[in-house]
């Protein structure tokens, strides 16, 4: 499995702890924390992939997810795919919350935590802690661990009691999982790839204006700051370090999430159509991983 590097989520996390904060309508911001010991893993919110580690690893990671949390029921899924489990293997998923101005890495509170010991015979996922005053609460019948041929899944359903905006990923058209959708989205990826090839940073940021606006709202951060953090000039200004990979020739895989309202394309595995190879590092790349909705017949970058 090739190693990979992505900066997107660390950009969002940095925004939450380093940007000047403004008054906001929602009382808390939210995050997810997960850990595995010696397992390959991936985590989704609303079936939108947030992170992937394709080699067995010891992980204890947290990411901000306010921009993925909706009113009512929400879902986090932690995927693993071991050859076999050992008795000491643990899967942990926690939902976090904190007030604006607090450091989410050190001051976040745990709404609840779920533990699964998949190597223990007859084990079931267990809610090991709950804060009854937290805005996020686990659904008692919504925590399950399922074994599948390709992967295993710890599914954590919970309810959000804090009012949230209606996000763009809730409003896109319901998409069909077919070649027509894939081919249409491929043309949009190809258009973006051409902008990367031209080094047109402003056009790329303009194409993601929905994402900028909603991340600014979710993190209570000025839009100008968010836009600047997503700038691609680092790649364009350092061709001796970063090289845009050629656009794939073969048909790609269409992926759908958020009740078939969000779409993205992958090549082999979780590889993406737009990435910058690190010239001085073998098999390392920075991936551009946009998530799209389609509204009024047009593709829009939503995340």
Image (cartoon, rainbow, N blue to C red):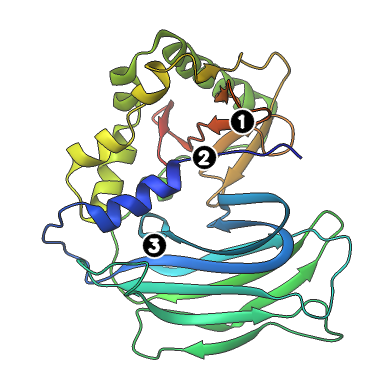
- Secondary element at tag 1: loop
Seen from this angle, which residue lies furthest top?
A: 198
Please tell me how crowded label 3 is: few (under 14), some (14-19), or many (20+) other residues with Cα within 10 Å: many
Residue drawn at (17%, 64%), measured in percent from left and top? 25
Q: Which of marks 3 and 1 is nearer the N terminus?
A: 3
- Residue corresponding to mark 2: 6
Q: Please determine whether, in this image, residue 209 is positioned above or below residue 117.
A: above
Q: Residue 272 carries which label?
A: 1
- Secondary element at tag 2: loop
Quadrant housing the C terminus: top left
Q: Rounded to the nearest whole Å, what is the CA distance between mark 1 and mark 2?
A: 11 Å
Quadrant housing the N terminus: top right
How far across and down, in percent of the image, does residue 64 sit? 40, 59
Name the quadrant containing residue 103. Answer: bottom left
Q: Rounded to the nearest whole Å, what is the CA distance between mark 2 and mark 3?
A: 25 Å
154 vs 101, left or right, is right
Please tell me how crowded label 2 is: few (under 14), some (14-19), or many (20+) other residues with Cα within 10 Å: some
Circle 3 or circle 1, nearest the eye:
1
154 vs 81, left or right, is left
How far across and down, in percent of the image, does residue 110 sit? 42, 80
- Residue corresponding to mark 3: 70
Name the quadrant containing residue 137. Answer: bottom left
Circle 2 or circle 3, nearest the eye:
2
Residue drawn at (37%, 25%), measured in percent from left and top? 234
Residue drawn at (74%, 84%), measured in percent from left and top? 124
Q: Rounded to the nearest whole Å, what is the CA distance between mark 3 and mark 1?
A: 27 Å
Circle 1 or circle 2, nearest the eye:
2
């Amino acid at each position: 499995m090739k190693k990979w590097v992505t900066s997107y989520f660390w950009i969002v996390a940095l925004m939450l702890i380093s940007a000047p904060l403004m008054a906001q309508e929602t009382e808390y911001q939210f995050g997810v924390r997960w850990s595995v010991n010696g397992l390959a893993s991936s985590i989704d919110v609303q079936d939108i992939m947030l992170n992937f580690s394709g080699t067995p690893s010891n992980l204890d990671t947290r990411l901000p997810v306010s921009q993925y949390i909706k009113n009512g029921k929400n879902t986090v899924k932690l995927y693993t795919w071991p050859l076999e489990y050992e008795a000491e293997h643990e899967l942990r998923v926690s939902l976090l919350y904190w007030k604006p101005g607090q450091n989410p890495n050190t001051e976040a509170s745990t709404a609840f935590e779920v533990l699964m010991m998949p190597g223990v015979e007859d084990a079931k996922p267990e809610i090991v802690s709950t804060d009854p005053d937290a805005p996020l609460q686990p659904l008692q019948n919504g925590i399950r661990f399922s074994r599948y041929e390709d992967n295993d899944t710890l599914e954590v359903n919970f309810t959000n009691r804090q009012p949230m905006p209606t996000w763009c990923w809730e409003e896109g058209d319901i998409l069909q999982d077919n070649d027509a959708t894939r081919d249409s989205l491929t043309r949009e990826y190809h258009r973006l790839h051409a902008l990367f090839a031209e080094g047109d940073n402003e056009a790329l940021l303009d194409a993601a204006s929905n994402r900028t606006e909603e991340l600014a709202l979710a993190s209570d951060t000025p839009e100008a700051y968010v836009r600047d953090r997503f700038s691609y000039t680092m790649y364009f200004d350092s061709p001796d370090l970063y090289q845009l990979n050629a656009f794939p020739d073969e048909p790609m895989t269409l992926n759908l999430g958020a009740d078939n309202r969000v779409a993205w394309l992958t090549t082999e595995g979780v590889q993406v159509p737009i990435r910058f190879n690190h010239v001085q590092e073998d098999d390392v790349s920075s991936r551009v991983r946009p998530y799209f909705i389609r509204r009024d017949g047009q593709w829009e970058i939503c995340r």
